Image: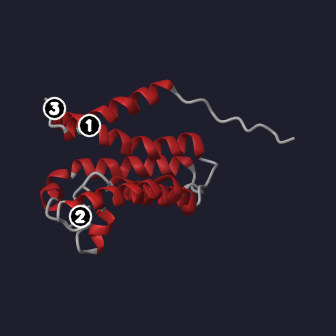
Amino acid sequence: MSAKINKPDRVQAIELLRIVAAYGIVAYHAQAPLHDLAYAGLVIFLILSPMLDLRFNLDRIRSPAALARALLLPWAFWMVVYGAVNLAQHRPFVEASFMGILYGSSPHLWFLPFMFAVLTVLNMLKSLAPAILFYGSALVATALLLTVTMWRSASLEWSLPFPQ
């Protein structure tokens, strides 16, 4: 007989936040009223993934292969789907550059390889004390927010997917 592995229960408030964030992303792409505000849904997703990984998986180091299965396989599937649509519309499958491959065949796909990279680096840093991760992240986030006026306009000129 095998022992039953108890998974932690999902926090319903976080699940609700994920649902609201998903609707925000749809509203943004649909150009709904207040669509610029709805773009925050993507930011919420990008914040939740590493936050929840540290909250519930601090002692669990996920291999790059496990992260690739969770993030890059769906990215590859949707890249093929959007690429087929591009080809049907007589457009290139992806942009003809290495960064175009990271971007994928649609501007909707960039966050999956980005989150794969973030979580892979985070797994390498989990051996540090949690306080170092917390204060280091807070310091970097604060520095980015305080200097946004210095780098934001220049970042819009960078190759895709880096402006995102």
Give the residue at the far bottom of this rendering. Answer: 97
Looking at the rendered structure, the kind of residue marked 2 is Leu
Q: Which residue is mark 3?
A: 32
Looking at the rendered structure, the kind of residue marked 3 is Ala
Residue 145: which numbered mark, if any?
none
The Cα atoms of the two marked residues, 1 and 3, are separated by 9 Å
Do the numbered discs 1 and 3 sit on residues whose CB atoms are within 8 Å? no
Do the numbered discs 2 and 3 sit on residues whose CB atoms are within 8 Å? no
Q: Which residue is mark 2?
A: 87
Residue 26: which numbered mark, if any?
1
Q: At x 32% / y 54%, what residue is drawn?
A: 109
Q: Is residue 19 above or below residue 109?
A: above
Q: Nearer the viewer, mark 2 or mark 3?
A: 2
82 and 88: which is toward the camera: 88
Tell me the crowding category of disc 3: few under 14, some 14 to 19, or many 20 or more residues within 10 angstroms, Cα based: few
Mark 2 or 1, nearer chain start: 1
Mark 2 or 3, nearer chain start: 3
Tell me the crowding category of disc 1: few under 14, some 14 to 19, or many 20 or more residues within 10 angstroms, Cα based: some
Q: Is residue 155 above or below residue 133?
A: below
Q: Taking 20 as reference, is 129 left or right?
A: right
Q: At x 45% / y 58%, what residue is drawn?
A: 72
Residue 126 sits in quarter: bottom right
Residue 123 sits in quarter: bottom right
Image location (x, y in percent) of residue 162: 25, 61
The Cα atoms of the two marked residues, 2 and 1, are separated by 24 Å
The Cα atoms of the two marked residues, 2 and 3, are separated by 28 Å
